[in-house]
Image: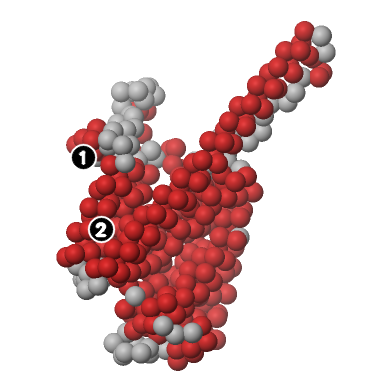
Amino acid sequence: MLLKTFGWSAAITIAGLVGGFLIGGPSGLAIVAILIVLEVSLSFDNAVVNATILKRMNAFWQKIFLTVGILIAVFGMRLIFPLLIVCLTGHVGPIEAIDLAIKGGDQETPGTYAHMLHDAHPSIAAFGGMFLLMLFLDFVFEERDLQWLRPIERPLAKIGKLDQLSVVVALLVLAVVSQTLAKDPGTVLFSGILGLMTYLLVGGLGDLFESQGEDDDDAAAGDDDAERSVATKAGDTAAQAPASKGVGTTAGKAAFFLFMYLEVLDASFSFDGVIGAFAISQDIFIIALGLGVGAMWIRSLTVYLVRQGTLDDYAYLEHGAMWAIGALAAILLISIKHEVPEVVTGLIGVGFIGAAYLSSLVRNKRIEAAGGQVEHLGG
């Protein structure tokens, strides 16, 4: 199981380290290794959140997530996206942006690729921060049977009964941030609204097509029941239709929009890593290698969590990941004005996941001691 899930990640890691050595020698190899660790540590909570979504997809779309998805993550987010940002914010053409990227240069030197990308950070942080904030708010404002941080989650779930409260709170946060932290309030406000709209659009379309798919499944099941009834009355048991396939999984248009939702989510998680990587190296190819290999490990970990049923075994992991997302959203918004070290971001995420894992272990022991009676121990 481990070899099947992580084998490709291990092979690509070796290839990435060799590529780093060919590009930059021993120092290039070392930087690629550092960036791999950076990406994995920053995005570990991303794997847990992705797993909660990926388990709703069928096997085909899970493979798409590992193949097409990793191409988007490596070439799209780690290579093409920074170039596009430089083109838009620096008012330069694609060829000039590529030339600037190849030339390198540090963030402190005006006119360099890294400096232009760093200047675009407020807009990027506002977009990603609002997307992640909406994800967090929708989670904590939803009433659920299982609660982790009861003194906080219970009252939040109660006030969350107010329709569209997450949108109101997110817009209020954006208004405050844009007026207090941003040098250019209008740009940050616009980028944040785009992030919120993207979350609502992609998530809404996914829910729409998923509900339509469930309606189709119900209709098909009704037809099957009718056919079986007729067949039974006729005494022809061999003509009874087989049970429906794919129960509990999403396919078709719904899976496509869930996939798109996952890619936007991954993008929001990767913003801080992509920009922070320029503090370690100014070579875009070294950065793409390191962060790309790290993204592959995160995707493999996501699939492993789904196939092992880890989220079911450790019930609070999703809660920990969501609180880590809330912390990351806050960090992104704060970083519009203040520098936040990547190590702080990584430690906060790992801290929430670790605490949720330990809480899950305690819960499992309590349930086992009670003879498996979950009802009164679930929250």
Chain-order first, disc 1 or disc 2: 1
Give percent across and percent down for residue 63.
61, 53
Q: Residues within 10 Å of mark 2 (few under 14, many from 20)?
A: many
Q: Quadrant of the C terminus?
A: top left
**Residue 102 location in percent, x, y?**
48, 88
Q: Of 138 and 246, which appears nearest the observer?
A: 138
- Residue 56 in the image: above or below residue 118: above
In the rendered view, does 71 fall on the left or right side of 156? right
Residue situated in front as seen by the camera: 277 or 360: 277
Q: Amino acid at mark 1?
A: Ile
Tell me the amino acid under the disc marked 2.
Leu
Query: Residue 34's x, y, as percent?
Result: 40, 74
Image-quadrant location for residue 246: top right
Q: Residues within 10 Å of mark 1 (few under 14, many from 20)?
A: few
- Name the residue rendered at 53%, 36% in the picture: 211
Q: According to the image, label 1 marks what residue?
A: 152
Q: Left or right: where does residue 6 sit relative to residue 47?
A: right
Give me the residue at 49% from left, 58% from top.
Answer: 263
Which numbered circle lies on residue 174? 2
The reply to whether the C-beta atoms of the residues labelled 1 and 2 are less than 8 Å apart is no
Q: Please say if 175 is above or below 372.
A: below
